Image: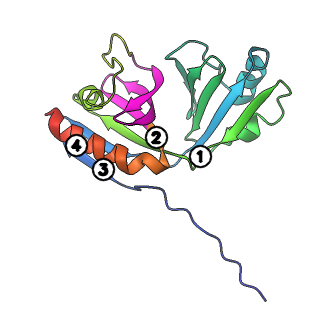
Amino acid sequence: MAKVVTAVRNPAHAGKSVGGQGVSLKVLEPASRMSLRARPDAVAALSKALGLTLPQKPKSSAAKAGRTVLWLGPDEWLVIDEAGGDPVADCGSVTGLHSAVDVSHRNVAIAVTGPNAAVTLSSGCPQDLSLAAFPVGAASRTILGKVEIVVLRTAEDAFRVECWRSFSDYVWGFLSEAARDAG
């Protein structure tokens, strides 16, 4: 009889953290992620299926019950579910034209927190991350150094940085170096 073996994926940088100089970095636990593209006539049905209203303005996000939706473009959102839900399955019954793709293993999330969090990110990000220009709940696709990231401001002194897994070593190193210089 054949023996069944189940592969277990180890999260990139699992448990990594660094702190000091008024900023700390921590790799966040894995989450379900979905890249969502939709036409305007499908937005209401998708919002209902996901349990929160899809944001419609640049730099905006919406969050409810462990699920966060970030506006990335006029017809594009990143859905992050940290509560164990399956956003792709939730969109399965929506008949309006849309594309819902599971990208859970593509990204790694890093929390950047502390009084020097914005300074740390600004060392490689050209976007104005001041509280006035980028308030709590603001989200944007931008760059850090040489790579694309998605950044969400989760509190006055806290950000969630999403990067592709293949660039996570670079992003972690860049943020670690910037954190040392922030002080």
Does residue 142 belong to the magenta stretch? yes
Q: Which residue bears the numbered disc 4?
A: 177
Q: Residues within 10 Å of mark 4 (few under 14, many from 20)?
A: few
Question: Mark 2 and mark 1: span between their CA atoms?
Answer: 11 Å
Question: Mark 4 and mark 3: span between their CA atoms?
Answer: 13 Å
Q: Which residues are magenta?
A: 135-161
Of the numbered discs 2 and 1, the one sitting upstream in the chain is: 1
Question: Mark 4 and mark 2: span between their CA atoms?
Answer: 17 Å
Q: Residue at x 22, y 29 (%)?
A: 116
Does residue 132 belong to the magenta stretch? no
Q: Nearer the viewer, mark 4 or mark 3?
A: 4
Q: Which residue bears the numbered disc 1?
A: 104
Q: Residue at x 55, y 45 (%)?
A: 31
Question: Mark 3 and mark 2: span between their CA atoms?
Answer: 16 Å
Q: Which residue bears the numbered disc 2?
A: 163
Quarter of the picture holding the N terminus: bottom right
The residue nearer to you, when weighing 71 against 124, is 124
Instruction: Give the image quarter of residue 181.
Output: top left
Of the numbered discs 1 and 4, the one sitting upstream in the chain is: 1
| Most frequent secondary structure within the magenta stretch | strand
Q: Nearer the viewer, mark 2 or mark 1?
A: 2
Looking at the rendered structure, the kind of residue marked 1 is Ser
Q: Give the colour scheme of this rendering.
A: rainbow
